[in-house]
Image (cartoon, rainbow, N blue to C red):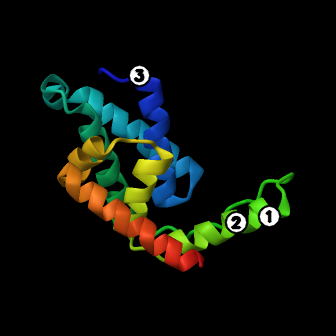
């Protein structure tokens, strides 16, 4: 794989955690994602390993929701934050939660996992320009929600 496997593992874990909100389940699904990825060489040979990893992880999360219907646990607040930073973080989290799940996923992939528009396009099956347009629209909506 051209990208560092450990870095990709951490990104897939964060992706699963974002989708599920439960640490242990995200770890389990991340491990299952990589086991499936390593068992199938067809996409690795075609050079689309990153898109394939996210596709497997996405399907794992969907399958988990179909089977389990998990209860969302509240995020633990870390101590030592400035009050303004905490309020800003909570406001941003509330605004992102008002977006559609597809828009939340797009924001997560771009700004948390720092994937390029081309990589996101491969994962979601969109053109790079569609990703840019959708991101611009999402950011505009977030700005409106925060005002």
In the picture, the disc for residue 84 is 1
Q: CA distance from mark 1 to mark 3?
A: 36 Å
In percent of the image, x 51 and y 42: which residue is there?
A: 27
Q: Residues within 10 Å of mark 1 (few under 14, many from 20)?
A: few
Q: Are marks 1 and 3 in contact (CB under 8 Å)?
A: no
Res 99 quadrant in image: bottom left
In percent of the image, x 43 and y 41: which residue is there?
A: 12
Res 141 quadrant in image: bottom left
- Residue 128 in view of the camera: yes
- Between 89 and 133, the residue placed more toward the observer is 133
N-terminal of the two: label 3 or label 2?
3
Q: Residues within 10 Å of mark 2 (few under 14, many from 20)?
A: few
Can you give x and y, in whole percent of width and height, for residue 87 in the image? 75, 68
N-terminal of the two: label 1 or label 3?
3
**25 up-or-down from 71: above or below:** above
Identify the image quadrant of the N terminus. top left
Residue at label 2?
88
Identify the image quadrant of the C terminus. bottom right
Can you give x and y, in whole percent of width and height, for residue 117 in the image? 30, 46
Res 139 quadrant in image: bottom left
Residue 46 in the figure: left or right of residue 16:
left
Q: Residues within 10 Å of mark 3 (few under 14, many from 20)?
A: few
Residue at label 3?
4
Q: CA distance from mark 1 to mark 2?
A: 6 Å
Q: CA distance from mark 3 to mark 2?
A: 33 Å
- Between label 3 and label 2, give the one nearer the viewer: 2
Q: Are marks 1 and 2 in contact (CB under 8 Å)?
A: yes
**67 up-or-down from 25: above or below:** below
How many numbered discs, if any?
3
Can you give x and y, in whole percent of width and height, for residue 92 in the image? 60, 67
């Amino acid at each position: 794989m051209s990208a560092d496997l450990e870095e990709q593992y951490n990104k897939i874990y964060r992706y699963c955690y974002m989708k599920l909100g439960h640490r242990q389940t995200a770890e389990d699904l991340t491990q299952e994602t990589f086991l499936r990825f390593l068992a199938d060489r067809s996409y690795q040979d075609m050079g689309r390993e990153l898109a394939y990893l996210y596709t497997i992880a996405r399907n794992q999360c969907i399958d988990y929701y179909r089977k389990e219907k998990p209860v969302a646990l509240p995020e633990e607040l870390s101590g030592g934050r400035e009050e303004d930073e905490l309020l800003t973080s909570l406001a941003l989290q509330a605004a992102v939660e008002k977006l559609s799940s597809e828009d939340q996923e797009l924001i997560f992939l771009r700004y948390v996992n720092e994937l390029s528009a081309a990589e996101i396009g491969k994962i979601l099956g969109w053109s790079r320009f569609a990703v840019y347009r959708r991101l611009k629209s999402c950011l505009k909506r977030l700005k409106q929600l925060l005002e």
